[in-house]
Image (cartoon, rainbow, N blue to C red):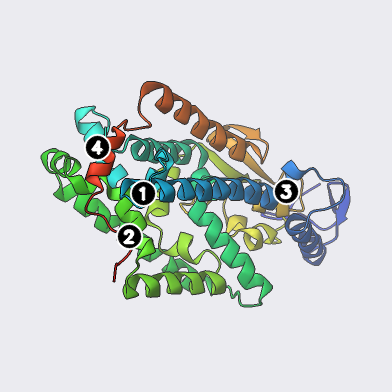
Amino acid sequence: MKKKSGGAAAGQEINGQKITGQAEGTKNAAAGTASAQNPGGPQKWLGRPLFLQSAVQYLFLAFYIYVGLCFFFYVMWAIGYSNVFVSRPPSVEAFLPIGGLMSLKRLLLTGQYDPIHPAGLTILIMALVTSFFLRKGFCGYLCPVGAVSRLLERLGQRLGLQRQPPRWLSWLLTLPKYFLLAFFFYIVLWSMDVAAIEGFMQTPYYIVADSKMLLFFLRPTTFVLVALGVLALGSLLVPGFWCRGFCPYGAFLGLFSLFSPTAVTRDAETCIQCRACSRACPTRIAVHKKQRVNDPECLGCTRCVAACPVKGCLNLSVGYGKKTRRIPAWGLAAASLLVVLALFAWAWSTGHWDNNIPPEMQRMLHRDIQLFQHP
């Protein structure tokens, strides 16, 4: 039977259902979108991308809340507010991305790993490797800040505050993070040579940079409170306000993901142009126009695949050109977790996770830090 270009012909059967025109295709697409957003019936949980993404992301958020509490009690001990020793959790170095970027440059130029904050460098490498092979799987499934952003987004939806801006405005909102990324690249990659980086790494400030970061949030300035308030309000009103608009880390990973062999692919011959995939995309990618979704904003969440009413039209594939292989939608989440666990096991077993600074020296380096003002 002859097919129309870019869509299904009238009367064509797809998935055992007869498509009688664009209106029928749109109707089926709406049903597919509703099923993807509110899956039920016999569908397995692994086939629900929204549930899978939320489950993995919130699990990592819970882990980092635990890490944050452990780090708080460690700092209380280090500055003398408590006599109970709590080991410093290396995972907290995930919140030192600039230090990780400096360490990465030093590693590439000298072959030497950061001895002060090795976990921060390891976590940056985890994120880059994940993005290179698995799109922005780190952002889509593992980032705790992204999880908080999504919680605010869902709260905004429940309160009826969420508004989707026009596509041109959505595109403009993605630009600030690239300006921030360019600024940090200029400071670290262009302005600082290896001698400057190594000199900074030997300062007491760099050694206790994670504790300084905690102070930044426990004693915020008015500017910090206003900035956090704007970001929280923006996340309530606009989907992905922080991740799409202002996260330079996400911008960096998005550029790496452009080389990824993993992507959602679209079969133009069976596509009915219902646009259900584009409506389901949380980052507003025009999936219905692309043969291969190779976009720096793609999180690899596969919501577009679940929303498509035409079986086999959208698939998650690995490879380039004609040499591609389909993988299950949950495969990206599973592979992202495997990459992180494998690199963690390597770092822990080779001494690239904990800095092993003696507790007595840790306390000495924290002697000038006060988290609370005394009257």
In the rendered structure, find residue 48 and report the number of the disc placed on it. 3
Say whether marks 1 and 3 touch (CB < 8 Å).
no
Q: For residue 281, say whether it is visible.
A: yes
Is label 2 in a helix, a strand or a loop? loop
Give the residue at x 60% y 40%. 333
Is label 4 in a helix, a strand or a loop? helix
What residue sits right under mark 4 in the picture? 361
Going from N to C along the chain, the mark reached first, 1 or 3, is 3
Say whether marks 1 and 2 touch (CB < 8 Å).
yes
Q: Quadrant of residue 239?
A: bottom right
Name which residue type carries label 3: Arg
Name which residue type carries label 1: Val
Say which of 353 and 158 sits in front: 353
In the rendered structure, find residue 371 and report the number of the disc placed on it. 2
Going from N to C along the chain, the mark reached first, 2 or 4, is 4
Q: CA distance from mark 1 to mark 4?
A: 13 Å
Q: CA distance from mark 2 to mark 4?
A: 19 Å
